[in-house]
């Protein structure tokens, strides 16, 4: 094994001892449940954003059996605003499966972990290393960036051949001890020292062995995925108030965008919106007041929403709560999982003033 490989882990651990994050809430105590929850939250989310959600989540669901016993609505309510809601649904499904098949605990076997919803090879490795100090590599975005620069690996990391090479390198660098610290060190180093936009190469303790620094290719690595223009979709959302100032929410389908969350009824165009209103409301569609447009960017498209507001609508026929439609007062918004842009609209000052008038 080369000196370059020998020193990589020891340098990272020495850096971590001086500059790493040692006071993250999931580190104290560092239980399998808390490690798992943090790893799921940190997918697509920065540490500083995840921390308050983590603290509220473990306060509500302190252990895996408690999470398994909760309803999906209760779980989504605690996740609301964090985005990428499939993560919350997978957490809930995994908790239930662990109660059914693993005596209420996470399994400490790589194959059993990877068989659970929402847990891939890297997340499983992070859980095993941090919760049980097992010798498994990780390959999240920070580690991919670190390894591609250090070894000068070209090509988009999502390409199977490049990813295979990076897994080999990640496994080669594993130390024999301090696996939990080493796993955290890689994530911290990639997030701070070897970050995407402004890497601190001059002060980097790895720069003498770093191929990208040596060859002047830091800005080129990791290789970006070929870009494409995101399509834009239009929608109309119906903000309907009853005489008591409650808002009508509709549960989203179990698959697709905002799956299983409670949102405003949505239509593709004015004709569909009018048809939905006529079918469910039996009120005066023409009383609708247009509100400012909402825009939201998903990973694969942009959504432009036109809200139409019916304040204190006089209903000729009462729509009763059911599994898909529910009248919700302002004091109940926090109890449901609601998409962030819709929650922002519902909680906006101007709308509250209108609803209270």
Image (spheres, rainbow, N blue to C red):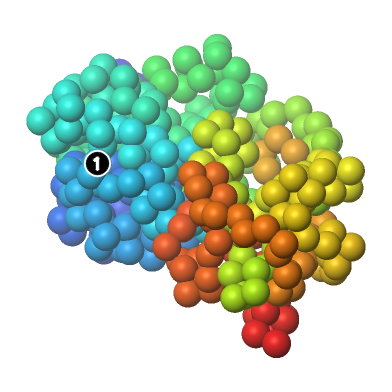
Give me the residue at 41% from left, 50% from top: 73
Apparent side of residue 90 relative to residue 306 in the rendered image (left or right): left
Q: Position of residue 251 (x, y in %)?
A: 55, 46
Give me the residue at 50% from left, 48% from top: 322
* Most foreground residue, 40 or 131: 40
Apparent side of residue 116 relative to residue 147 in the rendered image (left or right): left
**Residue 312 in the image: above or below residue 223:** below
Residue furthest out toward the top: 161
Please tell me in which quadrant of the rendered image residue 18 appears: bottom left
Give me the residue at 55% from left, 39% from top: 259
Badge 1 marks a residue whose secondary structure is helix
Q: Position of residue 144 (x, y in %)?
A: 50, 33
Q: Is residue 20 visible?
A: yes
Q: Is the N terminus in the top left, top right, bottom left or bottom right quadrant? A: top left
Q: Is the C terminus in the top left, top right, bottom left or bottom right quadrant? A: bottom right
* Most foreground residue, 108 or 17: 108
Residue identifier under label 1 = 68
Give me the residue at 37% from left, 28% from top: 117
Please tell me in which quadrant of the rendered image residue 19 appears: bottom left
Q: Residues within 10 Å of mark 1 (few under 14, many from 20)?
A: many
Q: Position of residue 182 (x, y in %)?
A: 27, 41
**Residue 141 in the image: above or below residue 354:** above
């Amino acid at each position: 094994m080369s000196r370059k490989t020998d020193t990589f882990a020891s340098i990272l651990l020495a850096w971590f001892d001086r500059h790493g994050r040692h006071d993250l809430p999931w580190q104290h105590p560092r239980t399998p449940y808390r490690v798992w929850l943090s790893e799921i939250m940190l997918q697509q989310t920065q540490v500083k954003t995840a921390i308050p959600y983590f603290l509220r989540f473990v306060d509500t669901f302190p252990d895996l059996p408690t999470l398994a016993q909760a309803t999906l609505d209760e779980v989504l309510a605690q996740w609301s605003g964090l985005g990428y809601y499939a993560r919350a649904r997978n957490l809930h499904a995994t908790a239930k499966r662990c109660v059914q098949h693993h005596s209420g605990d996470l399994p400490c076997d790589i194959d059993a972990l990877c068989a659970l919803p929402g847990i891939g090879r890297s997340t499983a490795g992070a859980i095993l290393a941090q919760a049980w100090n097992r010798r498994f590599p990780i390959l999240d975005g920070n580690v991919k960036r670190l390894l591609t620069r250090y070894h000068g690996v070209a090509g988009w990391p999502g390409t199977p051949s490049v990813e295979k090479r990076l897994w080999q390198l990640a496994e080669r660098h594993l130390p024999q001890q301090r696996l939990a610290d080493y796993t955290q060190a890689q994530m911290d180093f990639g997030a701070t020292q070897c970050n995407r936009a402004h890497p601190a190469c001059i002060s980097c303790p790895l720069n003498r062995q770093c191929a990208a620094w040596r060859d002047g290719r830091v800005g080129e690595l990791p290789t970006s995925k070929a870009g494409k223009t995101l399509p834009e979709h239009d929608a109309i959302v119906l903000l309907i108030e009853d005489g008591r100032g409650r808002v009508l929410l509709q549960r989203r389908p179990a698959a697709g965008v905002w799956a299983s969350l409670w949102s405003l009824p949505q239509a593709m165009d004015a004709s569909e919106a009018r048809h939905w209103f006529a079918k469910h409301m039996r009120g005066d569609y023409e009383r609708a007041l247009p509100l400012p447009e909402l825009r939201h960017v998903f990973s694969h498209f942009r959504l432009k929403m036109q809200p139409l507001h019916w304040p204190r609508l006089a209903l000729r026929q009462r729509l009763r709560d059911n599994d898909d439609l529910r009248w919700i007062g302002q004091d109940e918004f926090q109890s449901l999982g609601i998409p962030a842009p819709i929650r922002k609209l519902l909680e906006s000052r101007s709308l509250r003033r209108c609803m209270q008038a």
